Amino acid sequence: MQDEKTQAVRTMTDIVAKFTGYIGKRLPDDVMEKLGQLRAAETTPLAKVVYDSMFDNLAKADELDRPCCQDTGVIQYFVNAGADFPLLSDVRTILDEAVRQATREAPLRHNAVEVFVEKNTGDNTGDRIPWIDWEIIPNDDSITIEVYMAGGGCSLPGQGRTLMPAAGYEGVTGFVFDVISSYGVNACPPLLVGIGIGGSIDVAARLSKKALFRPIGSRNPDPHGAQMEELIEKGLNDLGIGPQGLSGQNSVMGVHIEKAARHPSTISVAVNVGCWAHRRGTIRINSDLSYEILSHKEASI
């Protein structure tokens, strides 16, 4: 039995390692589709040239089997784990080793620097890194893993604030515009903007990151939330930041809002963004270790 367990751990590690390396090289289907739409909408020669360079870069990454951006980020895993998944107790070890393997084989740039000692670990693992965000799903024996490469540029605009309740949703909107207009150009637009709204800053921050995993073009199920997404998206596009901050018709790929009920005395808002090379992917692994890649329909690992 122990030999079977050891082999199962190795098999899952290899699957996750290969998938992690894969998403550093090839963008998910919804991002590719949206970039194509934004490219077609541009009218200025400079914006068209920028988009052409993006797509040339993606083609080269695919041809050469190399990351599409040199900054392959700090690896984050958002895990929905079935309570009955047979390797649940081994997931932390599996994901750590998957990152080390992907770093060697993909290859991925070494980006994990230990705080205080300021030392790069050399394998993209370190204190609590790769970061794992967990949700346990009752009565389920599969595991769904969302992989995200949080690059330096797209992490730079990440901010949050707890507002006085009288600031209301106008205050939330104003904060989002302050962040994107001040820092968005550093994150390689067009951006995917994730907004979290809740009663404390830790909740809002977590929700703003999770918002980046929703399919581009999806809307918040609450009609007020959906309307707010649409209005903020239009307003950010009207800023004219354009691809790589060089001006253009569109500044963002989309705006996604996630929410949690709040205390009546506080309203917290946080913003996280994904850059144009929004490297994320979703894979579901079954109890028998068969798997399905949900984010890249043509993926083969």
Image (tube, rainbow, N blue to C red):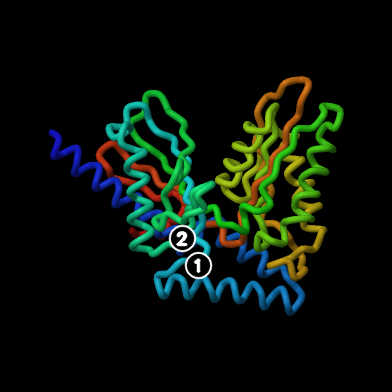
Foreground of the two, 54 or 184: 184
Residue at 71%, 73% (x, y): give it.
47
Tag of residue 24: 2
> In the image, is residue 100 above or below residue 207?
below
Whether residue 247 appears in this view of the structure is yes
Q: Left or right? Give the position of 230 relative to 151.
A: right
How far apart in space, not on screen, are marks 1 and 2 (Cα)?
Answer: 7 Å
Residue at 42%, 75% (x, y): give it.
63
In the orientation shown, which residue stands out farthest toward the front?
117
Locate the C terminus and report the quarter of the image it occupies: bottom left
In the orientation shown, which residue stands out farthest toward the right?
166
Residue at image mark 1? 68
Residue at 67%, 37% (x, y): give it.
196
Locate the N terminus and report the quarter of the image it occupies: top left
> In the image, is residue 29 above or below residue 228?
below
Q: Position of residue 216 (x, y in %)?
A: 60, 51
1 and 2 marks in contact (CB < 8 Å): yes
Foreground of the two, 83 or 119: 119
Residue type (three-letter) at the residue carrying disc 2: Gly
